Amino acid sequence: MERRPLILVADDDADIRNLFKVMLKPKYDLKFAVDGGSALAEANTEPLPDLILLDINLPDTDGFAVCEQLKADPALSSIPVIFVTGRVAAKDQARGLMAGAVDYITKPVNAPVTLLRVRTQLALLDQRRALEDQVLARTEELQETRLELIRRLARAMEFREGGLTNRVLRVSGYVELLAQGLGLKSKVVEILSQAAPLYDIGKMGISEHILKKTDSLNEQEWIEVRRHPEFGAGIIGEHKDPLLQQAYVMALTHHERWDGTGYPKKLKGNAIPLPGRIMALADAFEAMTSTQRHRSPIASMEAAKRIAAEAGKQFDPAVVKAFMANARQFDELRRKFKDELEGIHDLDFGSDK
């Protein structure tokens, strides 16, 4: 059954409240308030009203002040307010509209006019909500499209390196686990995990024969490979968008080391942005536990030992601590999104075998 609109009537006159009850009850649900304080309380009590009929002359405060407080509260500001008053001066009507009211009804109340104005404002509210729903749905659709393009771009990079894997899913999950383990806010965790797939996009600027080379790289080849963080930052560019900002930082700084011996800027300690420190460990775990052209993967437990040994050297000790607290979840995620033909190197954390 469709919910009926809920109207809050705030008036200290019992006769006026009864009049609105008789007038509105057949089509609308109602709740009442007798002063400014109870009007604010009822407006902020679930279910929230869809419309407020507000008297100006209330015993504790005037309706103008009540309306201004309603409009100052983000949770209540969208509720339309119609003033109902015996004041007929143009300055009072102007003040009411300036306070945020959408309409102004004078006493004595004319039932047909009041019903028409109530119906009009509720119809406008329905139209606005429908438009907001459409905008929200479109925004969510665009956001998902953007994330899918990011994932597809990262997959294209993998294809250029020699084949498609589940690396994007694994690395995004590792970053999410580390960010959560560090106690970052949920929105920051979401942005970092969504930005993570682009961290190695700079390899698009590396020669394909180097990317697919199966034996050790020579010094000149290593020099070229070490340019990929800057290539990645250049590909992503600098933006105001939070997701692309963090993708830029991750791409540029994920090979910096806590001890200052990394590249490309030889940043040290906290001078390395936190997203880069997180990505450095996530990338290292991924590299150690997945199949590489020049080496076989190692077990998750062995990778954890190596990472722990690098705390304060390659990795931020706080990020290592977050990793060790979630080592089991890292291994579970690796197994969940493992590539085909893997499995012989699996080692279950806490296995009963």
Image (cartoon, rainbow, N blue to C red):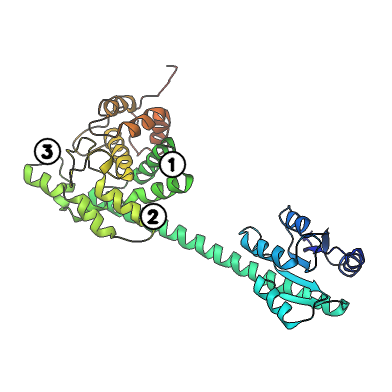
Camera-nearest label, 3 or 2 = 2
In this picture, is 183 found above or below 1?
A: above
Farthest-out residue, top = 353
Q: Who comes first in sequence, dot 3 or dot 2?
A: 3
- Label 2 close to label 1 by CB (< 8 Å): no
Query: Which corner quadrant holds the C terminus?
Result: top left
Labelled disc at residue 53: none
Q: Identify which amino acid the numbered label 1 is placed on.
A: Leu
The residue drawn where x is 76% and y is 56% is 37
Q: Nearer the viewer, mark 2 or mark 1?
A: 1
Q: Which residue is mark 1?
A: 184
Could you tell me which quadrant the N terminus lies in?
A: bottom right
Write down the residue under mark 3.
216
Image location of residue 57, percent across then percent down = 80, 68
Above/below status of 305 relative to 319: above
Residue under the point 36% across and 29% down: 321
Tell me the amino acid under the disc marked 2. Leu
